[in-house]
Image (tube, rainbow, N blue to C red):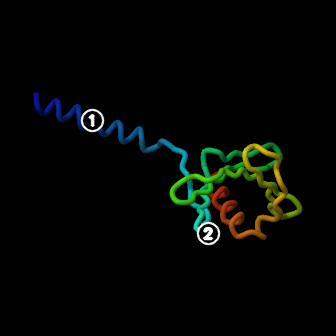
Amino acid sequence: MVNLKRGIVAGFTFLCLTLGAGSVFAEDVWAYTYHDGTQAYVDTDSMYRLIGGKIHAKVKKVKWDRVISIEEFLFNHDEGSWWYGYRFDNGPYKGGGNVTNSESVWNIFNVVQQYL
C-alpha cells in the first residue's frame, strides 16, 4: 500500500513538472541602468506587433526597488532604420528619433527584439 501511494505521488509530481515545463510567464527583463541608478525593465507581457510592423512595449523604470514610472515605446521601421516614440501615462506619443542615437533606447529595443 505504501508503494502504491509513493507511485501515485511520484506520478503526480512528474505530471506537474512535465506540464509546467512548457508554460510561459511574463517577466520584466533588465535593459539598462541610467547614470542615477534608475533601471529600465522591459515588461515582456506588454509587447506586441501592430499592423505595418510597428512594435509596442512598456518599460518600467525602477529605483530603490520601486517602480517610479512606466514608459510606453512605439518602434517603427522606416527608411532602413528603426525609429521610436514614447509616452507616459497614456499621454500623446512624443517623437524620440532613431533607436541607435540613444544607448538606453537601443538596449530596450534589443531586449524587445529578443523576446518578441
Q: Residue at x 60, y 45 (%)?
A: 45
Q: Is residue 106 above or below residue 18?
A: below
Question: At label 1, which amino acid type do we have?
Answer: Gly
Q: Residue at x 29, y 38 (%)?
A: 13
Q: Which residue is mark 2?
A: 36
Mark 2 or mark 1, whichever is nearer to me: 2
Residue 95 badge: none
From the viewer's perspective, tell me whether residue 6 is left or right of residue 18. Answer: left
From the viewer's perspective, tell me whether residue 70 is left or right of residue 27. Answer: right
Question: At label 2, which amino acid type do we have?
Answer: Asp
Most foreground residue, 76 or 104: 104
Residue at the extreme left of the image, as rendered: 1
Q: Quadrant of residue 17?
A: top left
Q: Position of residue 63 (x, y in %)?
A: 56, 59
Sort mark 1 into few (<14), some (14-19) or many (20+) by Cα contacts within 10 Å: few
Residue at the extreme right of the image, as rendered: 79
Residue 11 badge: 1
Q: Residue at x 79, y 50 (%)?
A: 54
Q: Residue at x 82, y 47 (%)?
A: 92
Q: Position of residue 10 (x, y in %)?
A: 24, 38
Dot 2 or dot 1: first in sequence order is 1
Most foreground residue, 57 or 3: 57
